[in-house]
Image (cartoon, rainbow, N blue to C red):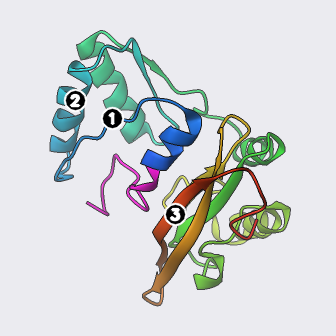
């Protein structure tokens, strides 16, 4: 469900490549994405795994954090959310400073147009986000749904994700960068970053 309140869905298929690049097991579970029911699907999947906890990347969504906390409590799991309540601008600078390569995979806010789609989050874009934050209230990390992002490389990936083919869609107010084909590749300068 592209309108899921709980799960990031833009280019969801790339998570398999991310897991392979990170050399961690990949577990896939399907859900119809019906509000609240999607948590039951997650709970059922987590209950079958031999794990001690769940890590989430939530920064500010109390909706998501509360639900994952409750689900983990019910299953006796630890919920670790290392980004929770962090200063957004500091966090985005830390991510880039650590060597992460991240692109904009969707935009849906005043001041963010189709020219952002597929582009890297870099110092120039951060400066523009800062300006849009001051002018329109755009969250620097997209926590209000202003944008979605996709990690294509990190220092802890064994390989980078190379985007072979992608297309952007734009409806006049929001858009998506849809990756059609991608592959893992030895680290090189890829992805227009």
Callout count: 3
Few, some or many residues within 10 Å of mark 2 (<14, 14–19, 20+): some
- The residue sitting at the bottom extreme is 172
Left or right: where 86 falls relative to 163: right
Q: Which residue is mark 2?
A: 45
Q: Quadrant of the N terminus?
A: bottom left
Residue under the point 49% across and 81% down:
167
Residue under the point 47% across and 90% down:
172
* Between marks 3 and 2 in the image, the one whose residue lies nearer the viewer: 3
Percent from the top left, x then y, of residue 38? 20, 43
Percent from the top left, x then y, of residue 123? 84, 61
Contact, mark 1 vs mark 3 (Cβ under 8 Å): no
Q: Which residue is mark 1?
A: 27
Dot placed on the residue nearer the N-terminal end, 3 or 2:
2
Residue under the point 57% across and 35% down:
22
Above or below 93: residue 188:
below
State which region is magenta: 1-15
Residue 176 in view here: yes
Q: Main secondary structure of the magenta part?
A: loop
* Between marks 1 and 3 in the image, the one whose residue lies nearer the viewer: 3
Residue under the point 82% across and 65% down:
127
Q: CA distance from mark 1 to mark 3?
A: 19 Å
Q: Which residue is mark 3?
A: 182
């Amino acid at each position: 469900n592209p309108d899921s309140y709980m799960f990031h869905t833009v280019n969801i298929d790339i998570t398999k490549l991310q897991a392979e690049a990170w050399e961690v097991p990949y577990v896939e579970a399907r859900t119809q994405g019906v509000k609240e029911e999607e948590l039951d699907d997650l709970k059922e999947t987590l209950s079958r795994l031999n794990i001690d906890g769940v890590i989430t990347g939530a920064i500010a969504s109390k909706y998501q954090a509360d639900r994952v906390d409750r689900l983990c409590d019910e299953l006796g799991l630890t919920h670790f959310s290392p980004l929770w309540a962090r200063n957004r601008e500091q966090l985005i600078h830390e991510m880039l400073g650590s060597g992460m390569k991240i692109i904009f995979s969707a935009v849906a806010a005043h001041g963010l147009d189709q020219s952002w789609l597929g582009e890297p989050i870099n110092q120039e874009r951060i400066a523009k986000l800062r300006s849009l934050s001051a002018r329109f209230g755009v969250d620097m990390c997209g926590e209000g749904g202003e944008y979605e992002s996709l990690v294509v490389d990190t220092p802890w990936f064994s390989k980078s994700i190379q985007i072979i083919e992608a297309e952007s869609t734009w409806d006049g107010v929001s858009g998506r960068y849809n990756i059609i084909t991608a592959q893992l590749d030895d680290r090189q300068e890829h992805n227009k970053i």
